[in-house]
Amino acid sequence: MTERTRNGLQGLRDNNNGLTLVELLVAVLLLSFVMFGVVTVLQSTFRGYSFVQSETSASTQAQASARAFTAGVRNASHLEVTDTLVRSEHASTGECMTWRIAGDNLYGSIDGGETLLASGVSGSFEGATPQGSPSIPGATLNLAVDTRRQGPVDITTTVFPRYQSEESSPCVSD
């Protein structure tokens, strides 16, 4: 071997600017472990977000329906309650209001224009009377909203009208 070749090989050994194949494989393996951990955490986060969003959406929908029901019955002058239907007449506007449970849906209507208030619900209506005053009819709404994840979200509200009219109503069969 010549002196020049020997010096050239020595120069290659002293060059530490690159990575060996073993170092590169170790770096790729470590990066793979880190990426696996990051992906696992992200998947868990997205699952948790989906769960919370489903629960929140179902609960919000049912609470909004219960608020509309409460406001309608509280402002009623006449009230009729069955297991699946509540009819009332608004005390100041005279509008006929109806809440109806059919299948897995809760519907509401004012003067005939029916709107879907909540879907994926099971429930019922019940007549109610306040203690000491059996002459004032009220209504109870029992809802169980399916969240498709955990158990249902249960909402129960009982409300009594503020006004009572002695006159007959075209909205309610007395």
Image: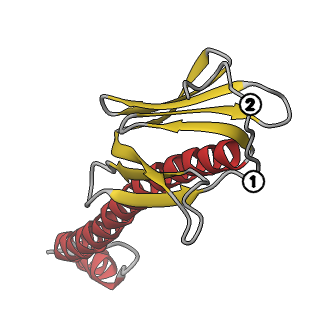
Could you say which quadrant of the image residue 39 lies in?
bottom left
The reply to whether callout 1 and callout 2 are in contact (CB within 8 Å) is no
Secondary structure under the numbered disc 2 in the rendered image: loop
In the image, residue 72 sits, relative to residue 13, either above or below, namely: above
Tell me the quadrant of the picture where the N terminus can be found. Answer: bottom left
Label 1: how many Cα within 10 Å (few below 14, some 14–19, many 20+): few
Residue 158 lies left or right of residue 1; in this view the side is right
Q: Say which of marks 1 and 2 sits in front.
A: 2
Q: Report the residue marked by disc 2.
A: 167
Q: Residue at x 27, y 67 (%)?
A: 40
Q: Residue at x 73, y 46 (%)?
A: 164
Between the residue at mark 1 and the residue at mark 2, the CA separation in whole angstroms equals 16 Å
Tell me the quadrant of the picture where the C terminus can be found. Answer: top right
Could you say which quadrant of the image residue 11 lies in?
bottom left
- Give the mark nearest the N terminus, 1 or 2: 1
Q: Position of residue 22 (x, y in %)?
A: 16, 75
| 42 or 102: nearer the viewer | 102
| 155 or 58: nearer the viewer | 155
Residue 120 lies left or right of residue 164; in this view the side is left
Q: Residue at x 44, y 59 (%)?
A: 155
Label 2: how many Cα within 10 Å (few below 14, some 14–19, many 20+): few
Residue type marked 1: Arg
Q: Position of residue 84 (x, y in %)?
A: 38, 34
Q: Residue at x 57, y 50 (%)?
A: 137
Q: Which mark is residue 162?
A: 1
